[in-house]
Amino acid sequence: MESRFLLAAEQLTVTPNPLVPKAGWITNSMLVTVIVTILVVIWARRSTAKMSLIPSGIQNLFEAIVETLYLTFEGIVGKHMISRVFSLLGTLFIFILAANWFGLVPGVGTIGFGVPSNIPLSLKDVSAPLLRPANADLNMTLGMALFFMAWWVFWTVQEVGVIGFLKENFAPKGGLKGFLWYALLPLFLFVGVIEMISIAIRPVSLSFRLFGNMYAGETLLHTMSDLGVSLPVPVNWLCSILFPLPFYFLELLVGLLQAFVFAMLCAVYIKLSTEHQEGEAAH
Amino acid sequence: MDAVGNVAQQFGVYWPNLIAQVVLFAIVYLVLKRYAFKPVIAMLEERRRRIEEGQLNAENIKKQLAAAEAKYQEILSKANTEAQRLLDEVRASGDRLAEQKQQEAVAAAEQISLKAKEAMTLERDRLMEEMKRELGRLVVDTTTRVTGKVLTPEDHQRINEETAREVAA
């Protein structure tokens, strides 16, 4: 049984599988990304195509989601930043959520290429799935994190300026003057360096957190599906449905939570780098 | 850098894949920003503006209602005062009129009484004069019958005067 668990876990490799031999960058996770992109765009366009002042149906749902996100992010980044940053934060949340939940659609990770079995249209083992959850590919999560960090740098510089950013991170704070200012300068410089390292690690932590959770979730579902593979034919089919079922609900929750965590952390990073400007402006 | 490269390779991170995913995400971002969030936020803003406007209108209407109520009370109070004043005036005017009519009635009654007195006096004088004349004639007749003599005009004159004197006394 132990070897079967390993085999099941190995079904989903850490790296995505190329779909086109001559274009290795076209992977199964990218195909899912394209599908999710199309679905999200269609949903958003249908929701906003014929907008009315009194919303109903699909417009109502979309507006409710957007309004909830807007108010939540506004509470973190503040009124002065929300109009600039909402589009990115909202896109991050919606896209990550859609991608995470799309990974739970039956067929994702289970339909693909591999060694054929005796049963028609079935494989002994799916070695190269056709569809791979988009966020179970580090390229996707790292890409989103880097995209966000690029905008974060832009908004931070726009808001506080390069000098302001450096002063905020390296200069002594708390209204220190005279000897105390010079005495504590090395300490604040050291803290500033640590802060720079922390900022540099942000895309790594953001991307690995999401990737790790989604990859682990997908692996868990695969493992649960293959748990009864050694049993006779009708029973092992039933087991492949019943065993992973509770974990699908868990993954629904994890998918939502991870989308929220990613977007919220991005909002917090924006707040941390722009909040002092607001305080100074208030004075 | 080699260590980073090794880790990236282990996790299947390659520049073409990374760039392709970034491009796809950028497309989602731009499309949602332009065609989804912009109209929705504009709609939410419009709705918020209308609600605020509605609340402001409701407040204005409330103020106008309060002002109208105050004005209504003021007008009512003024009308009450005016009505009371008119009532007092009417009452005073009525009293004056009644007094005037009473005085007129009294004067009229006095006049009637005076006229009646005058008529009575005249009647009494006339009756007295008639009675004197009758008494004089009766006295003359009686005297003529008792004495059997024919009385002269002088006697008549004297008897009449004496009778009149006696009656008057």
Image (cartoon, coloured by chain):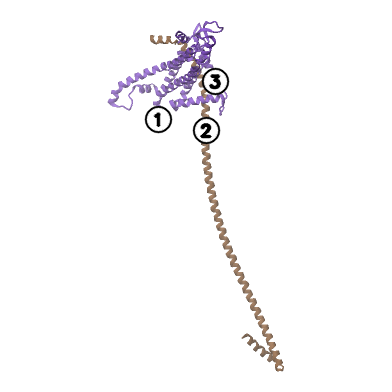
Chain colours: A purple, B brown
Rendering coords of residue A277 (x, y %): 40, 26
Amino acid identity at mark 2? Ile
Which residue appears farthest toward the left when viewing the image?
A179
Distance CA(mark 1)–CA(mark 2)? 29 Å
Q: Which residue is tagged 3? A: A43
Discs 3/2, front: 3
Circle 2 sits in a helix, a strand or a loop, which is it? helix
Circle 1 sits in a helix, a strand or a loop, which is it? helix
Residue at 40% across, 9% down: B6
Rendering coords of residue A262 (x, y %): 44, 20
The verdict on a common chain for dots 1 and 3 is yes
Q: Residues within 10 Å of mark 1 (few under 14, many from 20)?
A: few
Quarter containing the C terminus of chain A = top left
- Residue A17, numbered circle: none
Q: Badge 2 sits on which subunit?
A: B
Residue B106: quarter of image: bottom right
- Is residue B140 at least partly visible in the picture? yes
